[in-house]
Image (tube, rainbow, N blue to C red):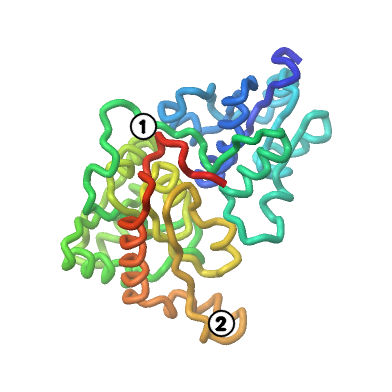
Amino acid sequence: MRHGARSAAFIMSPALGDTLNFLIVAHHLSLNGWHVDVFGNHAHALAGWFPHLRIAPALAADDARDVLMNYRHAVQMHQDRPLAQVGDWHAGFINLHEVEYAKNSDCMAKRFADFTARRFELDDATISNGMRPPAGLQFRKHAMRVAIHPEASTPDKRWLPERFLELARRLRAGGFQVEFVVEASERSRWEKLAADLPPLRSFASTALLAEWLFESGWFIGNDSGVGHLASSLGVPTLTIFRRRGIAERWRPGFTLGDVVLPSWWVPTAGLKERWWRESISVTRVLSAFRELRSRADRSPEPMHPAQETQGK
């Protein structure tokens, strides 16, 4: 073990939202004098936003054993991914499966902060991953810009495209600057849907996406890693979820945010899963957005990630 008793290697999930929440643990160990190394592609792309952490690309499975045996702890969010069977050969393996699936209503960011405080006896663990903007960026510079992410990793998380377009039209009528953020491979699908599309933004890296979000005023989107990125940057978020249980665990939790859930008049779990999109109207999303803005206006604390104000 080359790095000593207070050393930990963090093996990041390939998912952006998982990465940002998991970095809460790495951040607080680093603050408390641990030797912490992070391995993951999303984290590596955002390394400029985490100058206090040592971050490398994802470990190849063939290299994992040789690298991880240098640390007292090898920490992974999931028990068997992205690396399988690490617990079979690493005596200090830690996974957060029980934390993720615990029976409570806390969001993932709070669960990980509470786990850090409890497991490593750190009284100062808060809902923060230590993300800091590179020089030259202005927080929420475009205060009336609403970044909308109408996509998600799987189709079952996506609200109706036509309603995202109507939401954009109504926000623009209210004086907001609306822009959609989509992957380059997703652009053609949206370009076929309507002639009066908002601007479509695609970014070559997660770091460039972060810069654009950091200077946006608001975020609206489906359950996705982009929402967690906006929240981690301090941008108020409104997230559309298909189920309450998922929303409780996976709502972006770094700063001010809210969720919109399906109407519960839809009977049976099967029909809820099939018709949840139709049960969420544009009017309901706009109403939730107005309430979010009102809460932001009443908030006594600045929503800036450079300030450690987001407590447990």
Find residue 110 and report its horizontal and vertical position in percent: 59, 49
**Where 18 falls versus 308 (above or below)?**
below
**Which residue is under mark 2?**
271
Q: CA distance from mark 2 to mark 1?
A: 44 Å
Q: Comparing marks 2 and 1, which lies closer to the viewer?
A: 1
Q: Residue at x 66, y 38 (%)?
A: 116
| Residue 123 visible in image | yes
**Which residue is at the front of the view, 215 or 188?**
215
17 or 53, which is in the foreground?
53
In this view, the residue in front, 222 or 30, is 30
Picture quarter containing residue 31? top right
The image quarter in which residue 199 lies = bottom left
Determine whether 20 is above or below 160 in the image.
Answer: above
Is 71 on the left-hand or right-hand side of 290? Answer: right
Q: Amino acid at mark 2?
A: Leu
Quadrant of the frame with the N terminus: top right
Point 64% across, 22% down: residue: 34
Residue 148, visible in the rendered structure: no
Question: Horizontal and vertical percent for residue 241?
Answer: 49, 66
Check disc 1 and report its element: helix, strand or loop: loop
As rendered, which of 60 and 31 lies closer to the eye? 31
Q: Position of residue 148 (x, y in %)?
A: 32, 57
The residue pinned by badge 1 equals 133
The dot on residue 99 is none
**Residue plotted at (33% across, 74% down):** 282
Sequence order check, earlier mark of 2 and 1:
1
What type is the residue that disc 1 sits on?
Pro
- Where residue 175 appears, as percent x and y from the top left, is 16, 62
